[in-house]
Amino acid sequence: MVKLLKVHGSENKFFILDQTLLAIPLSDDELKNLAINLCQNILGGADGLLVVDTSENCLGKMRVINADGSEAKMCGNGLRTVSRYLSEKYHLNEFKVETLEAPLSVSKAEDFYKGVPAFSVEIAPISFNNTDLPFNYQQMTEMIDQSIPEFLPDQKFSAVAVPNPHLISFVSDINEDDLGTLGKNLNETNPYFPEGVNVSFAKILDTNKLFVQTYERGVGFTNACGTGMSATSLIFALLHTDKFDPTEDISVYNPGGMVKTHVNLNSIKELSELHLIGNATFTHEIQISEQNLHNNDLSNLTVTETGEQKSYQAFIDSFSN
């Protein structure tokens, strides 16, 4: 039997599959089909499948298969949960995890709340260059605080890859209809972002305090997007210096809870440092035969709740009331 985990970071929900424990690893097609099936049909669904593989230079490798079967370069919320899994598997609190773009440093952080373990993960690399996102708009090489009337007439937009591509707009109030329409349009065939883009609207609540909502490429509306909250924190630090205190963490609230980010700005903005700190919650353990995994047969599962969701809900209630 093989054990899968149902996990979340800020209610950004995933399944974790450790391929290193399988007699025969799943092929890419098998992983894609399994991700779609899991994310649509099991335990209320999820935003993706996190695949743990062996790595030559790091403690492990993480692949991110989105709910639609596409593969993402990185996932900040997912990386925290994989970091916890590897930390407990190998009894280490500080190490590196290989992602598609770069090896990233991760470490166990102080619990966010009783029974709510947390991890800090590096978010990198950073690029503002149009060829890295990529985007096309009026020969711009960068898009930072620009009016783009073709998107929405009364908002300004910034684009950054961390390394997933993000389009960010700071607003006085978040209009979910506008966010959903823009996110959908820019993730279908369009002349601006040919490979799609994650779209986030952000509201500044106070000094180092934000609320961020994201329409995620390959997923749609999500409770939280780790790289989205990190990218938004970076743009916030660059554009809103009157509200940014570089000596403190930034509290980023989202529909699924709250994370902290830390931004160390560099005069060369691509060399700035980003860290994402937040919960890594395991909600369910799932037992399945390896043969059924290969066959994408999810009809015979043994599911056990961990009880950790109650602690996470208590954490949410502690700042929601």
Image (cartoon, helix red, strand yellow):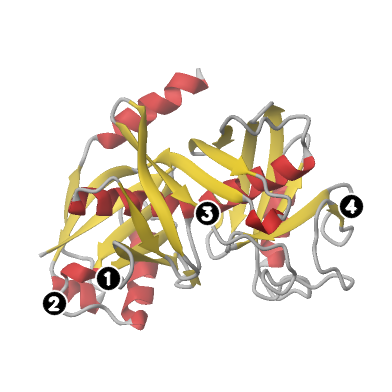
Residue 11 appears in view = yes
* Nearest to N terminus: mark 3 or mark 4: 3
Callout 3 amino acid: Ile
Callout 2 amino acid: Ala
* Residue at 28% across, 45% down: 93
Mark in the foreground, 2 or 1? 1
Secondary structure beneath label 3 = loop
For residue 54, the mark is: 1
Q: Which residue of the protein is positioned furthest toward the top in this rendering? A: 321
* Nearest to N terminus: mark 4 or mark 1: 1
* Residue at 32% across, 57% down: 15
CA gap, disc 3 to disc 2?
32 Å
- Residue indicated by mark 4: 153
Left or right: residue 97 versus residue 218 is left
Percent position (x, y) of residue 185? 72, 65
CA gap, disc 4 to disc 2?
55 Å
* Nearest to N terminus: mark 2 or mark 1: 2
Mark in the foreground, 4 or 1? 1
- Residue indicated by mark 2: 23
Secondary structure beneath label 4 = loop
For residue 123, the mark is: 3
Secondary structure beneath label 1 = loop
Q: Is residue 276 above or below residue 127?
A: above
Left or right: residue 177 versus residue 15 is right
Percent position (x, y) of residue 88? 21, 48
Q: Which residue of the protein is positioned furthest toward the front in this rendering? A: 267
Callout 4 amino acid: Pro
Percent position (x, y) of residue 301? 17, 59
| Marks 3,4: beta carbons within 8 A | no
Residue 175 appears in view = no
